[in-house]
Image: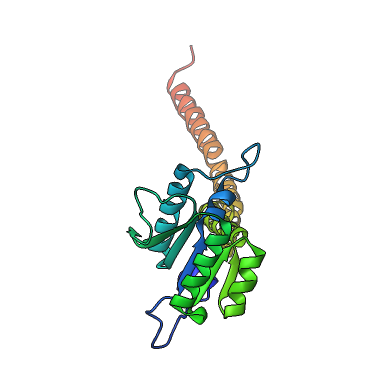
Amino acid sequence: MSFFRSLFGFRSSGPSSRSARKVVVDATSFAAAENKGRPGGFQPNPRDHFNTLRFLADLAAREQLDITAVFTGRPLREAPDGKPYKNITAYYAENVGAMEERILGLVRQFGPRETLVVGMSPGLEQKAMGLGAMCMRTSTVRKALEEKERQPQQNRRRPRNEAPPQNTAGDDDGNEDEQDDEPGEDQGSQDSREPRPREQRNGNGGRDREQRRDVLDLIDPV
């Protein structure tokens, strides 16, 4: 089960696991949450609505969600009222009150117990819960999205900070012991070889002196 299917309370097993619950979104509040940092307040325009529509369509495809978006304002040319856009359906209302009534009508149509409403209006939340639907704030969904986007980056950095395996330290200790033993062996072999050159020098010197004596003995004194 995907992260958002679990967040939205979709079934993970059973005969109805393949029939996804409906998610009805106050899409204008989604656009407002996306652009809440704009100075002087924010009034969504058609471009903002279209960006939100594309975002929700990508989310529905990625997370295998059945999403219906309801906007406050004029219908978009790319997604007429009640018509599908990619894998979601868009609806429109003239004002906030009409938008809430449109969402409640969709809850009744889809079945309250099979529908989740995402919005920011406390009044809409109370009415939808009164019908038996589940509700979730737009800010909660946006926060969950941001946390999920950060997870892959943290996972990519994590292996760089991991400590080396314990057996590696043991291998290093063993190598250090071997290095400590090697100098002793080399010193021992050098000590055993040092007297040999001196003995050879002494031996050669003695033979040279003996040869000189033999030559002198052969020379008759004058």
Specify the color scheme: rainbow
| Quarter occupied by the N terminus | bottom left
Choose between 169 and 21: the one closer to the eye: 21
Residue that sits furthest to the bottom in the current view: 15
Choose between 112 and 67: the one closer to the eye: 112
Report whether 63 appears left or right of 119: left
Q: Say which quarter of the image contains residue 87.
A: bottom left
Relative vertical location of residue 204 with respect to residue 190 in this rendering, above or below: above
Does residue 209 appear in this view? Answer: yes
Q: Say which quarter of the image contains residue 181.
A: bottom right
Give the residue at x 59% y 67%: 136
Choose between 101 and 111: the one closer to the eye: 101
Give the residue at x 40% y 85%: 16
Residue 168: percent from left, percent from top: 55, 60
Give the residue at x 48% y 69%: 23
Give the residue at x 50% y 54%: 94
Residue 199: percent from left, percent from top: 54, 39
Does residue 167 appear in this view? Answer: no
Relative vertical location of residue 115 with respect to residue 143 in this rendering, above or below: below
Q: Say which quarter of the image contains residue 64.
A: bottom left
Residue 133: percent from left, percent from top: 55, 77
Q: How many marks?
A: 0
Residue 13: percent from left, percent from top: 44, 84
Residue that sits furthest to the top in the current view: 222
